[in-house]
Every structure is written in structure tokens, then in C-alpha cells.
Image: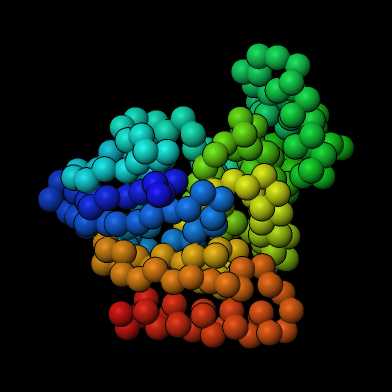
Amino acid sequence: MLKYLTVNNVSKVYQAKTALHDANLEVDRGSFVAIVGMSGSGKTTLLRMIAGLEQPTTGEIRQNDRQVTSINPQARCMFQDDRLLPWMTVSENLTFGAKDKEQRARAQRLLETMELMEFSNYYPTKLSGGQRQRVALARALMDNPELLLLDEPLGALDALTRLRMQDLILKITNEQKITTMLVTHDVSEAVRMANRIIVVKNSQILRQLDNPYQGVDNENGKLRRLELVDEVLDIIYHG
């Protein structure tokens, strides 16, 4: 059976510096995968190649059994900086380029889901960091993407806002069955959100771990996640 997304023997070299070496990965449709590792380990390089923002030096990436050779039309990205257009209102940031009433109606539904309707006519500079990231998430979801790629989207948020955003992302991606890949330095965040953890070290995919405690917030689930966090940290620091 074909996997939804495959990374096959992928390497990326920049001016004789290897950013990622011989990466192999299979992602099931509807899964939530977190990629963790130290800065410079190759996490973001891998995500950018899956998005089609960069191309592998060797190897190939396939989604729905089609090779990704340019900007991936089935994927949408969300970054740590919200990248909102400051001269447009919240609503306009979502509907910019909208061609029909259905797209505008979808924007309204997303604003309701994000609890942002009262801010629809605000400009981004008038919003808090958490509100801007909710707008950025809504914008990433506007085209009903099959694949959502998250590159440290919550890194600049305070702890409580970060937890709220984690819950919101989990709720939406589970309800809409969106395949999601998250790059994060926060191992606790990865273990709370993802059902699979990919550990990248020294430009290689070092380990892949299943996580049956994704989003399980009872006492046993929290305890098991703490144990998995310790295991992942041990892999990162000691291999």
C-alpha cells in the first residue's frame, strides 16, 4: 500500500555543507508528525523540501505518489513569524485573492473557529501575538490543504497562549483529518501534539518513535509523555 508522503534517500547540500543526509521517511495520511532536534540539525531543511520551497540535491519526495519538484500545491505552511500583510485587515488577509462567495464564507467560518470575528476589521498591528498566529493558521487553512507544515509557529508565544494554540491546532487537524508536520525545539510540545516523533541529529534522521499518548491529558497520559520526553532528549543529547 502506497504511503501518503515519502522521503526517499534525500540529501541537501549547500556549497559543500550537508544540511540533510540520506533521509528516509514515510508519513501516513491524517497523521501528526513532529520533527525535533537541535538548531542546525536539518529539521527546517526537511520541511522546506516537503513544501517544495527547496529541492533535494539527491533523492526524491513524493506525495500521493507524485514527485514534489516545485512548490507543493497540496501543502500550506505556517511559520514562527505570522507573515500577515500589515496594510490589510484580518478579514482581508484571509480573503485576499478570493474568487467566489464560498471562499469568503469559509473565511468567516475560520474566523469564528479561531474566535476572531470581533477582530475581523482590525489590522495585524492591533493584535496580540497569539491572535496574529490564529489569523496565520486560518490563512493556512483557507484552501483546505491536505498537508499542513508548521515551522516553529508557537515559538514566540507565552506558555498559556502556546498551550491554547496547541489545543486549537490539534482540534482542527483532527476534525478535518489534515496530515500535519511540525518542526519544534520544544520536545514537550512535540510529544503532546504528535502521534509520531522524528529525531534529527547531525543532518540525519536518527530515530522515529510512535507516540500513543498524543493529546491524552489524564494523569497516566501526562506521566507517559514525560517518560517519552526524557527518551527523546536522551536520543538528542547522547544518540
**Percent coordinates x, y for residue 172 in the rendering:** 69, 49
> What is the quadrant of residue 143 in the picture?
top right
| Residue beneath the point at 32% across and 43% down | 61
| Residue beneath the point at 72% across and 84% down | 219
**Percent coordinates x, y for residue 2 in the rendering:** 39, 46
From where the camera sits, is residue 86 visible? no
> What is the quadrant of residue 135 in the picture?
top right
Q: Does residue 63 sit above or below 91 in this rendering?
A: below
Most extreme residue toward the front is 1
Q: Does residue 215 sit above or below 218 in this rendering?
A: above
- Choose between 28 and 16: the one closer to the eye: 28
**Percent coordinates x, y for residue 171 in the rendering:** 71, 54
| Residue beneath the point at 71% across and 59% down | 167
> What is the quadrant of residue 40 in the picture?
bottom left
From where the camera sits, is residue 73 visible? yes
Q: Is residue 110 left or right of residue 34?
A: right
Q: Is residue 220 left or right of residue 55?
A: right
